[in-house]
Amino acid sequence: MKLELNGKEIEIDLLDADTLEKYGKAIEPLRKTIELNGDNAIVYVKSFCKVVYDFFDTLLGEGSAQMIFDGKQNMKLCNDCILKCISSCEKYLINQFAKDADKIINSWKEFLA
């Protein structure tokens, strides 16, 4: 699946076992409660952006977040990109993954009958 994030085209192949495993590892910290201190705006924004950077670096490889965000720590930009990525990946896993996997398996199944 191809995604455009901040003007950059990103390829995420969720039929690849390594990518699927990386996605699971990347998303797990997001499921836990993130304790951010809203009293200090700078710390709040940097902490949020670090979580997003860590997600993309885990999923796509070290330095990917730097490339996607051009080194910027913009909370809205980070949120827009992670939301697009997660929603696209989850929609694919829920709606399309099983269909694609079945299609692959069925492509050679007839030869073994």
Image: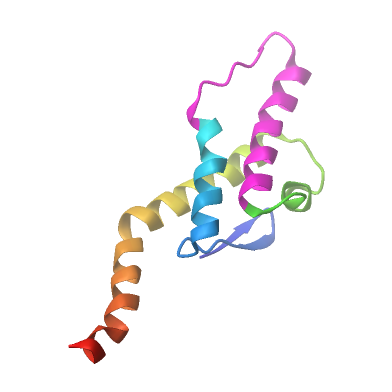
- Is 45 inside the magenta-drawn segment? yes
Instruction: Quadrant for residue 79, please give it.
Output: top right
Residue at 66% from the left image edge and 12% from the top image edge: 38
Q: Is residue 70 left or right of residue 30?
A: right
Instruction: Quadrant for residue 47, please give it.
Output: top right
Residue furthest bottom in the image = 111
Residue at 81% from the left image edge and 49% from the top image edge: 70
The colouring scheme, among rainbow, by chain, secondary structure or one colour, is rainbow
Residue 8, given in percent of the width and then of the height, sits at: 69, 60
Residue furthest top in the image = 39
Q: Main secondary structure of the magenta part?
A: helix
- Is 61 inside the magenta-drawn segment? no
Residue furthest front in the image = 112
Q: Classify 104 as above or below 41.
A: below
Residue 85 seen in this snapshot: no
Q: Is residue 13 left or right of residue 111?
A: right
Instruction: Quadrant for residue 52, please give it.
Output: top right
Seen from the viewer's position, the closer of residues 18 and 88 is 18
Residue at 27% from the left image edge and 80% from the top image edge: 106
Residue at 47% from the left image edge and 60% from the top image edge: 14
Q: Is residue 68 left or right of residue 32?
A: right
Residue furthest left in the image = 113
Residue 93 seen in this snapshot: yes
Quadrant (top left, top right, bottom left, bottom right) of the C terminus: bottom left
Q: Is residue 32 left or right of residue 70?
A: left
Residue 28, given in percent of the width and then of the height, sits at: 51, 35
Q: Tell me which segment is drawn in magenta.
A: 31-59
Seen from the viewer's position, the closer of residues 108 and 39 is 108
Residue 97, given in percent of the width and then of the height, sits at: 36, 62
Count of numbered labels shown in the rendering: 0
